[in-house]
Image (tube, grey):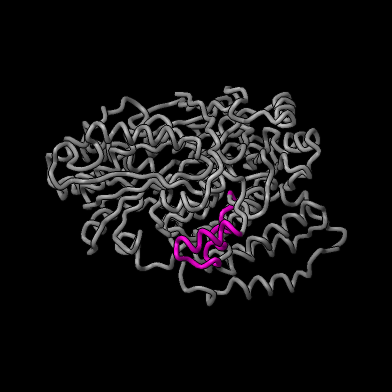
């Protein structure tokens, strides 16, 4: 399926009408900010003050939220805001040179607004288009795929002529699913309502027992047992129960949920509705990452069709008392919101700062009520399990990793795209299927996952061996693994929420030392400091982001040491920093007394 990904920019919006549209609910602050900016270009202070007054919030709170998300602008930006995806796979395809080319043509400096206010050009983190890059976003709502030097020239010309981006060639914004290998979740789908009708014929606990029988584990990375999570939510005391879909697919190299949202939305929404029947929820929310804003109208149309088919709303399929509906909340660019408690904070109109746990969301989640948060792929799996049974699902895969897993394959291969395999599949099998040649490394699970060398291609995907959130990034022997690790380090430093000192400072120290090595001023002591930073950060940060930030660093130093050694200068130790002082600072700021909690990684 191919979508036309252009979305119109709304007319200029005023604060009062937006606040009224959201019933003056302060929990809708992020959505009000997003819609105001879509109509006005940026968020001036007087508008933030007006929002604060109308919502009964302090100006400090509203400004804090506006300043947290990278897609919000509290200073003027260009009428055309072009953001190049800065994922490593985009870089390998030449995105950096294309950004510089566009800046030269438009006579604008990267990260700055041109003097006439027409345009600004910068980078953003992975846009979820790794299989058809280089990619970019225009004004946060229009995607550009498969960029070329010739296309960059045309884009510059259209911007100079002030042609509305909605009138740009539609083929520039086409996104292909690129499903290369389908299994049960990407194969024939049950018709809308089939799974739900079967579920409604059984008691909720019976349905839940079947989910437990399937041994389904969360498909977002951490692999928590879905049945256990739902049972805890169902048993928790509260006035309301909520079902939340985590569609904040921010892990670089991951784009499987993009495909499910594009072509399998009915299966997703059916899975959410089944979850609502099980846990007793009346309201569901989808947290859609800001980079997937172009999918909003499509998803809303699917929801409306389901309402018309009595698959959402009151007395679903004639079942008196079963009332459930789903709304979509669009994020504003924050990787940390992939962590379920940070996601809930954002849904409540706050900065996306992970919560200290316990209490866990299943007991004290959205608005303080019992909440289950599951990944897009997890809910899709639930729909298939409801049709075919938990025992059927448990027979697929391995004993501890049942069912199939969808993989987002990108990088140095002939056929990037989406591949679905049963758990237990060998790494080498995927490399063979996608046409990878002379491969030296595979980054499984994105930057927070594991980097495998050629000696490990006989290992198997699964929670028993190589767990994954879905990313499968391939690097052949022409690639510098030091540069790969450096790109990942820059990503984590950029995406740190800044709440805890170990992550805020530690990720910056990692980048500074890698940049020092890049400039040719490094020594073996720098590599040792990087080792120390990894050990210090791993158990001291507030959430999984900081704990995982050094994963690619650790793996590449251990498995691709020559890539670092070629950047060492053993003839002199002219350093940008005092090593002992740097290490002492790292030990001070990453001590365990900063926070007492370490949160589970992303679901």
* Residue located at (74% from left, 73% from top): 580
Q: x%, y% of residue 513?
A: 73, 59
State the image quarter where residue 594 is shown.
bottom right
Rendered-image quadrant of the N terminus: top left
User: Dominant secondary structure of the magenta stretch?
Assistant: helix
Report the number of discs: 0
Q: Which of 189 and 225 is in front in this view?
A: 189
Q: x%, y% of residue 9?
A: 55, 37
Q: x%, y% of residue 496?
A: 58, 59
Image: magenta residue range: 46-71
* Residue located at (26% from left, 46% from top): 275
Q: Which of 70 and 255 is in front in this view?
A: 70
Residue 51 highlighted magenta (yes or no): yes
* Left/right of residue 416 with respect to residue 21 in the rendered view: right
State the image quarter where residue 195 is shown.
top left
Compared to residue 45, the image places residue 462 above or below, namely above
Q: Which of 163 and 155 is in front in this view?
A: 163
Compared to residue 593, the image places residue 300 above or below, namely above
* Left/right of residue 182 with respect to residue 68 in the rendered view: left
Q: Does any portion of residue 260 appear in the rendered image?
A: no
Compared to residue 222, the image places residue 425 above or below, namely above
* Residue located at (76% from left, 69% from top): 579
* Left/right of residue 437 with respect to residue 61 in the rendered view: right
Q: Does any portion of residue 274 appear in the rendered image?
A: yes
* Left/right of residue 578 with respect to residue 349 in the rendered view: right
Residue 437 highlighted magenta (yes or no): no
Q: x%, y% of residue 144?
A: 60, 31
């Amino acid at each position: 399926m191919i979508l036309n990904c252009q979305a119109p920019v709304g007319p200029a919006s005023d604060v009062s009408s937006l606040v009224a549209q959201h019933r003056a609910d302060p929990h809708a602050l992020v959505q009000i900010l997003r819609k105001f900016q879509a109509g006005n270009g940026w968020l001036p202070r007087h508008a933030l003050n007006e929002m604060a007054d109308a919502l009964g919030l302090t100006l400090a709170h509203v400004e804090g939220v506006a300043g947290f998300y990278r897609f919000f602008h509290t200073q003027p930006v260009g009428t055309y805001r072009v953001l190049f995806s800065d994922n490593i796979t985009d870089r390998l395809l030449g995105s950096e040179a294309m950004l510089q080319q566009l800046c030269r043509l438009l006579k604008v400096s990267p990260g700055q607004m041109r003097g006439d206010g027409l345009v600004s050009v910068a980078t953003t983190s992975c846009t979820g288009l790794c299989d058809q890059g280089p990619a970019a976003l225009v004004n946060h709502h229009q995607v550009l795929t498969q960029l070329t030097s010739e296309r960059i020239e045309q884009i510059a010309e259209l911007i100079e002529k002030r042609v509305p981006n909605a009138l740009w060639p539609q083929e520039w914004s086409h996104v292909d699913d690129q499903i290369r290998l389908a299994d049960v979740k990407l194969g024939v789908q049950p018709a809308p309502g089939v799974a739900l009708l079967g579920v409604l014929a059984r008691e909720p606990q019976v349905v839940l027992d079947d989910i437990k029988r399937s041994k389904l584990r969360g498909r977002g990375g951490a692999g928590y047992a879905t049945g256990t999570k739902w049972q805890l939510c169902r048993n928790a005391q509260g006035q309301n129960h909520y079902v939340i879909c985590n569609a904040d697919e921010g892990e670089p190299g991951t784009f499987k949920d993009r495909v499910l949202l594009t072509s399998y939305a009915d299966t997703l929404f059916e899975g959410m509705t089944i979850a609502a029947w099980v846990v007793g929820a009346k309201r569901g929310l989808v947290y859609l990452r800001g980079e997937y804003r172009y999918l909003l109208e499509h998803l809303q149309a699917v929801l409306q069709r389901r309402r018309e088919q009595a698959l959402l709303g009151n007395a679903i399929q004639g079942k008196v008392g079963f009332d459930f509906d789903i709304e979509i909340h669009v994020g504003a660019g924050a990787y940390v919101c992939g962590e379920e408690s940070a996601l809930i904070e954002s849904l409540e109109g706050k900065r996306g700062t992970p919560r200290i746990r316990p209490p866990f969301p299943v007991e004290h989640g959205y608005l303080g009520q019992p909440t289950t948060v599951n990944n897009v792929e997890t809910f899709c799996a639930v729909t298939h399990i409801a049709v075919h049974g938990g025992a059927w699902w448990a027979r697929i895969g391995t004993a501890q990793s049942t069912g199939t897993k969808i993989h987002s394959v990108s990088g140095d291969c002939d056929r990037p795209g989406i591949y679905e395999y049963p758990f237990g599949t060998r790494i080498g099998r995927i490399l063979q299927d996608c046409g990878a040649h002379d491969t030296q490394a595979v980054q499984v699970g994105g930057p927070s996952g594991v980097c495998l060398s050629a000696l490990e291609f006989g290992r198997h995907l699964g929670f028993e061996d190589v767990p994954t959130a879905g990313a499968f990034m391939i690097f052949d022997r022409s690639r510098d693994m030091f540069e790969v690790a450096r790109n990942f380090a820059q990503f984590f430093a950029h995406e740190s929420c800044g709440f805890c000192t170990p992550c805020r400072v530690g990720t910056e120290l990692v980048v500074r030392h890698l940049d020092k090595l890049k400039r040719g001023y490094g020594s073996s002591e720098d590599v040792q400091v990087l080792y120390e930073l990894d050990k210090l950060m791993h158990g001291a940060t507030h959430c999984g982001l900081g704990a995982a930030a050094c994963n690619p660093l650790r793996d590449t130093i251990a498995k691709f040491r020559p890539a670092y050694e070629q950047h060492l200068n053993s003839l002199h130790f002219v350093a940008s920093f005092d090593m002992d002082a740097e290490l002492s600072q790292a030990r001070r700021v990453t001590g365990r007394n900063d926070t007492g909690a370490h949160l589970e990684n992303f679901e």
